[in-house]
Image (tube, grey):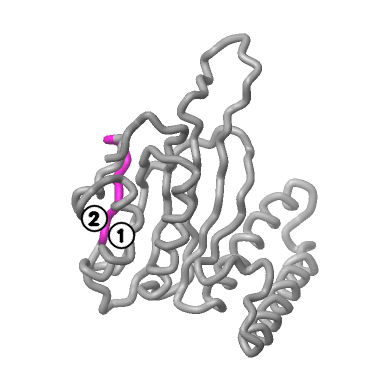
Amino acid sequence: MASYNTPFEIHVHGEVPLREDVTFEQLQDALKPLWKYSGARSLADAAESAYEEEPGIRFDAHKHLLQMCWTVPGDEDFRQALDEMCMGLNELAQDGAPIEVTFYDSDFDDEEEGGDDEARDDFAMYFVGPTPAAIMQVQRDLLVQDTIGLMERHFDGSELGDVVAAIDKLFAQRFDALVSSMQLGKPPRGLGGSSGSGGHGSGGRKPRHLH
């Protein structure tokens, strides 16, 4: 594993449905940016998380599923490894899937009293999928879920049909822009490239995801 003298503990969490023909060797190659970053020589060597209570990186061959609940010490350069990983997983994914990544400030102490410094925690969502349309679909579904969850505090769910329709319209416009830009050879702004990465934002300390 990499040195713990790093500014962040980085937690990667998500489940990616894989094609039925995907082998462990193919998955190991797609995840190479992660296990190389950790200082391991193979996926098997890096599969365990920095925390024993986390399942780590698992390949369920029967369900054709990649499961990640894995923490590694690192720095901002880990984002490059994530981008490369997403590119590799796009080739193996059966459907679109989100991957949550949280950067925890290693030096911040929640228990420290009287400190004026704020944690440098950060949170990002990455998306993978076999096609841009599959990535957009999972982005759309998550946005609808989050929006409805927020607005149901004030409105009945039956009143929010127009909100969902507006979100669908925005994604339809983005998809049309994608198709047009692919014909022109320019990726549209906002999709996040083939890795579908994005959604950066800080929002305080977030709990770890455990199975």
What residue is at 30 percent from the left and 42 percent from the top? 49
Q: Residues within 10 Å of mark 2 (few under 14, many from 20)?
A: many
Residue that mark 1 sits on = 32
Please report the bounds of the magenta region as a residue range: 52-59
What residue is at 29 percent from the left and 52 percent from the top? 35
Above or below, 145 relative to 170: above
Total residue callouts: 2
Amino acid type indicated by mark 2: Leu
The first of marks 2 and 1 along the sequence is: 1
Above or below, 196 relative to 209: below
What residue is at 70 percent from the left and 79 percent from the top? 172
Above or below, 191 relative to 211: below
In front: 88, or 128? 88
Quadrant where the N terminus sits is top left
Q: Are marks 2 and 1 in contact (CB under 8 Å)?
A: yes
Quadrant position of residue 193: bottom right
The answer to whether residue 144 is left or right of residue 120 is right
Residue that mark 2 sits on = 43
Residue 55, position as x, y percentages in the image: 29, 45
Amino acid type indicated by mark 1: Lys
